[in-house]
Amino acid sequence: MLTGSTGRILGRQEAVEALEECITRSGSAEQPAFLLFTGTGGSGKTALLNKLAAEIDQVVPYAHFDFGRVEKNAGLPEVLSALAFELGRRCPGYGRLRFHRLVVGLLAMSEDVDVSDPDKARRTMIDVLRRNRGYDKVWEFTRASAGDLAGLLGVPAPLRPTFGALASLGVDYVTSREAGSSFLLGEPYRWYGHQDREHTADPMRVLGALNRRAGNLDDRENREAVEGLLTEAFLADLRAAFSHGIRSKPGMYDCVVLLDNIDSELGERFRRHYLRAIGHKPRAVPLVAAATARQASERHANEHIRVVPLRELTPGETEELARPELPGGVDHRVAPLVHGLTGGHPGSTALMLEAAATWPSAVREGAGALLAQEDPRSAAEGKPGVLVEQRLREDLLRSVPDLPEAVPVDDALLATLAALAVARSADDAAWIISERLEGALLGAEALWRSCLWHEGATTGDRALLRWLLLRWSYRHGDDTVPRLRRELRDRCRTSGDTVGELYHALGVGDVAACVRGLAESLPHTGDARPWLDQLHAVTTVPRAADAHAPPSPHELQIELAGQVADAEPGHLPTVARVTVGMWIAGDPGTAVDRYYLHTWIANDLRELATRSARPVGLFEEADRHDALAQDWKS
């Protein structure tokens, strides 16, 4: 749980407020019926739903369901039964919600009915409904209807029969004091004739068709019809439950279903039927679905859906998260160190802070030293010997879109992805995929969707994965990365992509060529801000890990900038120190002693400002590095 010292879940207040806003607008046809929280793997989606569940428990009726844990043979009838079971738990002020219409449909599906004889079918159905009474048995029915999915709700497992035997359990959706035939064949039964629309039909014919279609749910048309009708029945039960009594009074909250991993195949079917059903009705449904998915798609462009992207943690939130995680005496610079590595990706941030708490002496040496320690989580899981770097890399790989589960995470896969991570632009990536990765372990489409090039996915998790892949390649002595950089450098030069040319030149270690290119473009008369943009773009290239790093980042700056002779005329040495300094400062593997590094960058930027006709941008950048220097002061 990404919880700070105040107990709140960090970086997710917007999501909590979005749910509060929706559930307090009961009865409004304008409310978004579907909140979609999006974020990559490890972004805290599951933690958010767990937190929301804790917040609304015993406040509103709710259900919490994870589509990611559902077996492939499960269907939507079982899902609706599982949701009905949880929503039907007693809640103060709401009592127990009853799903009469859904139960009638499920009973009709479960019974062997001869639909060729309408009179016999009617007698059979009446007999089924009369047999199933006794409100105490509703829990047995809904639990049994959920089948194996009941286990995902934390429900005890004594009742897990096959779906076809549900009716034999006996169930009632009314109290035992009510007369059987008069109510059981009342509005819940009649609903199947009108379904809250103007047209009417014979309910028995509708239920007979439902029974017939339920006999072969492998057929897509049958499955669509059955799932659509049961979803409408489920929502009609909720409308009826909130149409009278205390639940209908102003100020009452809507009920909630929390749905994790709705971007699974079964989850998408639920979303489609749910949105289609609420679109058919003029009255709002007293239900808010709060779901999680890795990303929104065109399928989610709907007036009833509100997409809430889960942002990454800010530096301040990372520091707040670190306070309760770390014991006393740990270097206070661990928060900016971790944020610089993870970009605020919640899952990676939590893992690195756990590593820092376990290995506090490694913090001063930088993220590289922390990554080389044994992962505390793996050790607790009975998997000793797994390093933090390996655990982090494998966790991030699981969030890559379209990475087949059957593909092993081995050297061949890592080498393929590391080659793609060399690319800066989409043009770079397209060339690598078509010319250098043809016939690779992954297909071109999967590689393209991974967005592993620098300008592809810019989220913290993807930037960290790129860095880890390149780090793996360097440490394994693979010459693919430097070879690709040299080829891309030549291609960028030919195409006139100056930023790309200098980016790859610096990445391959040609500091002198990169510095000369930047020095030549430094304006003497115009605004310096475009040059700073170019400088930032070039120095974001990942740096190869040092075999024998100098004792401090500042000394490393002196060593690398020394590749451009101090005897060079003009401002070239100053540009060299600024360029190399920013490159080192932006490297996640740089140690925490960065105070003098940022101080010298600031001083050199002010020196360059004296040579510029419009130096404001340079002065502002110098001030930024002065502030960063204070963050890294010991």
Image: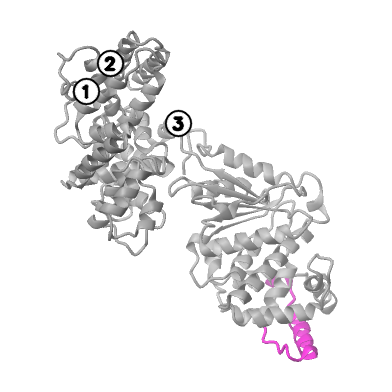
Residue 58 part of the magenta segment: no
Q: Residue at x 68, y 81 (%)?
A: 211
Would you say residue 391 is visible in this rendering?
no
* Distance CA(mark 2)–CA(mark 3): 29 Å
Looking at the picture, tell me which residue is in the foreground, 151 or 282: 282
* Chain-order first, disc 1 or disc 3: 3
Res. 320 mark: 3
Residue at horizontal 17 percent and vertical 48 percent from the top: 478
Residue on which disc 1 sits: 557
- The amino acid beneath tag 2 is Trp
Could you say whether the residue bearing mark 1 is in a helix, strand or loop? helix
Which tag, 1 or 2, sits closer to the chain's start? 1
- The C terminus - image quarter: top left
- Image point 69% across, 46% down: which residue? 23
Q: Position of residue 324 (x, y in %)?
A: 42, 34
Q: Which residue is mark 2?
A: 600
Span colored in magenta: 111-137
Q: Position of residue 250 (x, y in %)?
A: 80, 45
Assign the magenta stretch its main secondary structure. helix
C-alpha separation, residue under disc 1 versus residue under disc 2: 10 Å
